[in-house]
Structures are given as C-alpha cells and as structure tokens.
Image (cartoon, rainbow, N blue to C red):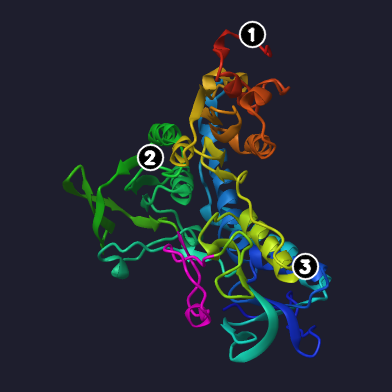
Amino acid sequence: MSTQTDDCRAPTDTAQNGQYDLAVIGAGSAGFSAAITAAEQGAQVALIGYGTIGGTCVNVGCVPSKALIRAAEAVHHANSAARFSGIEASGQVKDWNALRAQKDALVSSLRQAKYIDLLPAYNGVAYMEGKARLATGGIVVDGNHINAGKVIIATGSHEFVPAIPGIEGTPYLTSTSAFEMESLPNSMIVIGGGYIGCELAQMFSRLGVKVTIVFRSRLLPEGEPEISRALAGYFGEEGITVQHVGGYDSIRADDDGIVLSVTIDGTAKTLEARQVLLSAGRQANTTGLGLEDAGVALLSNGGIKVDDRMRTTKAGVYAAGDVTGRDQFVYMAAYGAKIAASNAMNGDGRSYDSLAMPAVVFTDPQVASVGLTEADARAQGVDAKTSVLSLDNVPRALAARDTRGLIKLVADSASNKLIGAHILAPEGADSIQTAAIAIKQGMTYTDLGETIFPYLTTVEGLKLAAQTFDMDVSKLSCCAG
C-alpha cells in the first residue's frame, strides 16, 4: 500500500453523524468518476484507496505505455524515412533511462493534476487509504467500520499469470515491470497476442530488442481475421517473429535467460530469449473484498457480475470498471462508474450501453474498432454483409507512401444500417469515432457514403469503404462521389 503524501489530502470525515451516502472502494479512474458524480449530486462519499492513487491507467497502463510507444514510433519513422525520395535519416535509443525518466515525470504530473489535486475541490468526498471489504451497513477499512447506504466496488484488475509449468520459479516481466527495466534486453519473448502483447512487442522491437511474440489463437483474436493476418505480416516485415503455438509446455530460467518449451504443429520446440514478458490478459481484483460472504456473484472470468444498471447480486452494492471483467478500457471504467453512482443515488434509472464503444490498439498501423465484427453479427443471427477496402485506395495513404492497412465495414443486409467498423491504418485511432457516431445514430452505409469528408485524410477511407458496398471506388476520380 502506498503511504499518504504531503501532496494528497489527509483523510477527512465529511459525513453527517458518521453516515456516508456512498462508499467507493478503489481510487482509480472508475473510483474517482463514481465519487465525483455522487458528490456533485450532494452525496457524502467515502473514497477508499489502496496502492498508488490513480489506479492502473495513469500509473502503469495507458499513460506510460503510450508515451513509450510514441517514442518507439519516432525511432521507427526516422529509420523508414527513405520511403520518400531524397530523404535519409536514422534513429536509435541512446539513453533508455532518460526515456524512462521522461515517462515517469509525465505519469507523476498527470497523477498529481488528475487525481491528487482534485480531492480538495470536492468537499463531499472523504479520501482514506486502506484495505476495504464489504460489511453489514457499509464497509470495513483496516478494521474500522464505515457506515454507508450504498457501495460501489471499483478495484480494477491486475496482470494474469498463465499456468505454465515452471512459471512460479521463473523471473518474468509484466506490462508494469517491463517499463521499469534499468536496461533493454537484447531479446524478449512476449507471451500473448492480445492488445497489450501486440503493443509492447512492437514497441520493444522498435527500441532495438529482438522480439518473438507467441500465442495460441491469433493476434488480436477478438477482432476481424483480415486485420489479424495483415498485422502479423507487418510485424514480420519489421523483424518480429510471430509464432502460433499449440501450447506452452514449460518455462525455466538458465544462465542465458529464459527457455520456453512450446508445441508447434504437433512438435515440441524450445524458444530462448533474455527476458519473457507475460501479456496473457488481466484479472479482476476481487480478493479480500468479502464478496462471497456478502453474496456478490462472480463471472467465470473472475469479474464481478453486474446487470445493465451496474448492480451486483447484492442489493445496494454496485461495481464498475475492470473489476467487472468486461470492456477493460479506462473510458469505459469511468463511464460505467458514473452510471453506477447515478443509479446508487437516484434509483437505478440509467443503463450501461456499449453498442458504440470504440476500442483502439496502439500498434502501427493502429487497430480501431467499434460495433460488431462479422462473426459476432452472424452469431447473433444478423444477415450481415461487409465491405473491405485496402489502404492503397485511400489518397491519404498514397500521399504518405504508407499503404499498410485496410478498412472493413459490417452492415445489416435487411436495413443497410452500419453495425460494425474496423480500421487498420497508421492514423486509424483518430478515425474510429466517426464510425462510432454513425452506428450510434443508426446511419446506413449509404448515409455514410454520401457524407462529405475532407480530402487527403485517413477518415475519408470510411466514406470510400461505405461506397465499396455498391461500387468499385478505384473507378472514381479524386473527391468524386
């Protein structure tokens, strides 16, 4: 547990007669969102933190990873500048620890500005630190009972450690500890092909580490297979070894680093590297909360079961964010927590809606998605039709001399409504919100294709992909249609 600092407000008691309207367990993005939402409605809130204030995103997740990913992109872009005639450039990491220090300074400044400095602005929020668990009439924090009418659990998640024989005695990196290495290793095995594994495998490769990424399904297994295949190819072009395995047989350390025994096409093989990074997903932080005794049910993935009002199976107890085991994005944590707090204070009138939830993987090209995949749509009984547009049909990509990527749209054949959009493009993250709005507003792909888009932008690819349902866009002149 982190200790109270001079920068953070000391614990206070703002409750009337020691009774809080709401207790929030967890002081990350979801916890702060819930506490602020309730306080703005006049509630007296007990906000309980354990560990470093601010939670995963600002401290060890989104902020540090994206800062280092952008730095690695700078190295790569310098080394790929020769795609433009007459330009010669090169980049390399000269001081990894200076880069780490810059990352740490950014983390510290955002933690101060977005969490610690916010506390004094909300007189209705009493912040305290300690281990909390559910109890009759409220919660218990380090043995002290706190009376609260309602409770929201927002304790986040931690790195999942896969059950590979030998893992207990093998030193390994996680997405947290990897950012704290004092020096870059010469080689690394990344276990897991999800979004964290993909982001970090490419980042470390671009920083000069020889990377092998291994997985049992495919890269980004929940996404579109066309995007998975293309991304695997781009990784290979950058020198990353992309390896599908049938299973992880064992892992051990030796004098040279790590030895991972795997099965590839039915044959036992060994992979060796100086370090191994586990990125096999994240698991909800539910231990020690007294959930079983309180009657709070869990999902099969370990997350707290909630309904669309963010209610758990225990009356008066809500949950939001990564601890629910779904939609593990910081903005969805804040969104769900706001709904939980509003419902806890006002009678469960708001519902959680992830229909138009955008998701981004910060690889290069970036992967951005919203709505249903083709497979998801068909599994739900939707007669889906799709269009797939390669980026060599997008003028922005041609001008940038970087046509890596594609755009895939999914529509309901019965109504022509857009129900899914999936982008693989160097600037794909900045385009997905247009598709999210289109889906939320019930637009058809014809509506999208007839919308005016600015020329020589990546987002114009959405218009072209929409037109691809009914025509060959390669036959259009610039800006036509």
What element does badge 3 sit on?
A: helix
What element does badge 1 sit on?
A: loop
Q: Three-letter amino acid code at disc 1? A: Ser
Which of pointers 1 and 3 lies earlier in the amino acid sequence?
A: 3
Vertical position of residue 16 compared to residue 425: above or below: below
**Magenta extent:** 282-305
In front of the other: label 1 or label 2? 1
In front of the other: label 1 or label 3? 1
- Label 1, label 3: how far apart the Cα atoms are: 53 Å
Q: In the image, 381: left or right of 172?
A: right
Query: How many neighbours does mark 2 have within 10 angstroms: few (below 14), some (14-19), or many (20 or more)?
Result: many
For the question of whether residue 25 can be seen, the reply is: no
Q: Nearer the viewer, residue 233 or 359?
A: 359
Measured from the top left, where is residue 152 in percent x and y? 64, 72
Q: Is residue 300 magenta?
A: yes
Vertical position of residue 393 compared to residue 365: above or below: above
Q: Nearer the viewer, residue 166 or 187?
A: 166
Vertical position of residue 214 compared to residue 283: above or below: above
Which residue is identified by label 2? Answer: 240
Q: Nearer the viewer, residue 185 or 450?
A: 450
Are discs 1 and 3 less than 8 Å apart at CB?
Answer: no
Quarter of the figure with residue 121: bottom right
Which residue corresponds to the image point at 56% horizontal and 16% vertical from the top-left? 470
The tag on residue 477 is 1
Which residue is identified by label 3? Answer: 118
Query: How many neighbours does mark 1 have within 10 angstroms: few (below 14), some (14-19), or many (20 or more)?
Result: few
Q: Nearer the viewer, residue 345 or 328?
A: 345
